[in-house]
Image: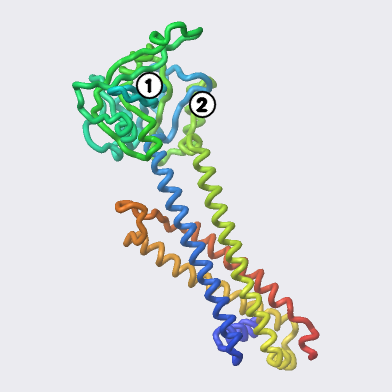
Amino acid sequence: MKFPVFIAKRYLFTKSSNNAINIITLISAVSIIAGAAALFIVLSGFSGLKDFSLSFSSIFDPDLKVLPASGKTILFTPDLAAELEANPDIISYTQVIEERAFLEFRGKNHIAYIKGVDENYRKVNSIDSTLLYGNWITPEEPVAAIGFGISRILSLGVNNYSDLLRVMVPKPGTGQITDPTQAFNSSQLVVSDIFQVNEELDQKYLFTNIDYVRKLLNYNEATLSSVELKLNPKADPVQVQQRIQRLFGDQTEVKTRFQLNDKLYKMLNAENLAVYLIFTLVLIIALFNLVGSIIMIIIDKKANIRTLHSLGASLKDIKKIYFLQGTMMSVFGGIIGLILGSLIVGAQLQFQLKMITPTLPYPMEFTLVNFLAVFFTISILGILASYLASSTIRPKLLQD
């Protein structure tokens, strides 16, 4: 094996007497380097976009959420509360009542979700990082925190005590509505705070204290829409999920943050896979240059091949020489491309070279998974291309 490796290294780092072959080999090497760098940069960009997109959901979605299996409400008794408080895997929990509501302010209307939460809500979810100005809701007063989108649609600011925000929710019950004016429970709120996450969430939610929503919907103390849990970082979410599911019973379903956003996760993973496959196809096309350059080198080195054969090298050894030359070109080119791509990704992370907005840099993330994925992809494809090129050597070539 040492003999083919030695000759392959000499061929790899020595120029050919034919300038055209040197140019073809250079183009092949540049294609491999550029392909590896481009694939790593794109995968790093999509990893950054994925984390950036999921960071929005993590603000409103807890580690675990107990939801009704059917209908709108669950039963939350003092015994269940005591079980949650005694569980060492649960740092905190919050009770939530949520309902679709009709908002009206100075003749402007908007439909959103009113979300009644208790004093533990900010311990479970990272809502504090999104608050713009004002004061968060208090359990004693009829005040609300609204999204920036709702504020813009209704032209509504904070602490406006002269004009209050009117909230209307459907009255619970069954049967036909004969008087539309009696179909809603109505109340008024003062806006005390505004939060901003993204366009969709900013137009969707209004937060207020849970007692206010409970009275508005005529719910009793044990009736909730959901219970949201914050877990100990060392806890296994799946195991805790199973225990909480047994605790609450079949009338509820317990979901992890991943399950709450399964469509978003699937979409982002599908996009990431699609980009990987597209750029892998580009790499395959680029590696045709490698096949061509190896074949051209074989043709150019026919005299050398016959000399090696005369000196005792077998056909298998000669094929191995060109196979190793192509493989080393692929691996070394992939490593150089990865180093180049890593420098570009690092420069973006450090110096924010590309900006989406004046204050928001294009998100990127350097991950070992992406690095290894690109390295093994370029290596495997390079090995296959090298094998294809070296297999063109036939016994007839040694006899001519």
Residue 58 sits in quarter = top left
Q: Tally the numbered discs.
A: 2
Query: Marks 2/1: CA distance?
Result: 28 Å
Q: Secondary structure at mark 1?
A: strand
Q: Which part of the image, by quadrant, shows the N terminus?
A: bottom right
The residue mark sitting in front, 2 or 1, is 1
Mark on residue 299?
A: none
Q: Residue at x 45, y 66 (%)?
A: 341
Instruction: Note whether 305 is above or below 228 in the view shown.
Output: below
Residue 217 sits in quarter = top left
Q: Position of residue 297 (x, y in %)?
A: 65, 84
Tell me the kind of residue under disc 1.
Answer: Phe
Q: Position of residue 271 (x, y in %)?
A: 53, 50
Tell me the kind of residue under disc 2.
Answer: Glu
Please tell me which residue lies in front, 7 or 356: 356
The mark nearer the N terminus, 2 or 1, is 1
Q: Which part of the image, by quadrant, shows the C terminus?
A: bottom right
Q: Residue at x 61, y 90 (%)?
A: 18
Q: Which residue is mark 2?
A: 253
Q: Residue at x 30, y 34 (%)?
A: 152
Q: Secondary structure at mark 2?
A: strand
Residue 123 in sight from this viewpoint: no
Instruction: Note whether 238 is above or below 357 in the view shown.
Output: above
State if disc 1 and disc 2 touch (CB < 8 Å). Answer: no
In the picture provided, is 133 more to the left or to the right than 243? left
In the picture provided, is 226 more to the left or to the right than 378? left
Q: Which residue is mark 1?
A: 102
